Amino acid sequence: MNGEEGRQEVKSTVNTAVVLSGGNMGDTKALIDKACRKLEILCQTPIRRSSFCVSEPWGFDAAQFFYNQVWVFETAHTAEQLLDHLLHIEQEAGRQRIQQEGYASRTLDLDLLFLGQQMIQNDKITVPHPRLHLRRFTLLPLVEVIPDFIHPTFLCSLAQLLEQCSDPGHAQLEKP
């Protein structure tokens, strides 16, 4: 045996990951920027970002509007590995997840929206994110960076989902 025989090649699959970052407590833009830089280091990949989207709270009342930003990057991490990274970054930003009914203000929220065309549902994670098509504040920044991405469940582009979105909430992209 010459060393090449018997060796198995392990292939890692690279997928496009899409994350929605957001928050409405503290210096949200700075927290989002810092979180993005941490994820770039952890995943060792450049991250393409949308503009910030400013929106009123969705599903609850709060005095502060939200800032959201979409991040798109290539990764060989699994959905579960990415989720663990995202939860750790949230915790470092002061996010305290408490069991409660409904939505609440937060320092930082990081949601894995897509991982390529994978469809995953288990007790830890659901991908694609199950409510992204209902939220204008998610669709606006998504369409800014990847308008032609096909949603694996609805089999239409994100631009088409935005056209069909009936969310009456105020949301708009901030232009530099």
Image (cartoon, grey):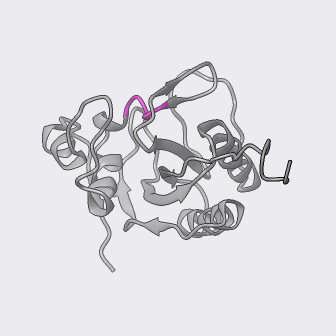
Nearer to me, 118 or 3: 3
Left or right for 162, reference 11 = left
Give me the residue at 66% from left, 60% from top: 43
Specify whether residue 129 is painted magenta: yes
Q: Main secondary structure of the magenta part?
A: loop
Range drawn in magenta: 127-131
Q: Is residue 5 left or right of residue 90?
A: right
Residue 151: % across, % down: 30, 38
Q: Residue at x 29, y 36 (%)?
A: 133
Give percent across and percent down for residue 45: 59, 67
Q: Residue at x 24, y 55 (%)?
A: 147
The correct choice, above or below, for 69 with respect to 124 in the image is: below
Front-lying residue, 64 or 93: 93
Image quadrant for the C terminus? bottom left
Residue 81's x, y, as percent? 68, 42
Query: Looking at the image, is 136 positioned above or below residue 142?
Result: above
The verdict on residue 56 being magenta is no
Judging depth in this view, the residue of 63 and 127 nearest the camera is: 127
Residue 109: percent from the left, percent from the top?
Answer: 57, 47
Residue at position x 36%, y 59% in the image: 54
Q: Is residue 77 left or right of residue 146?
A: right
On screen, residue 61 above or below 176: above
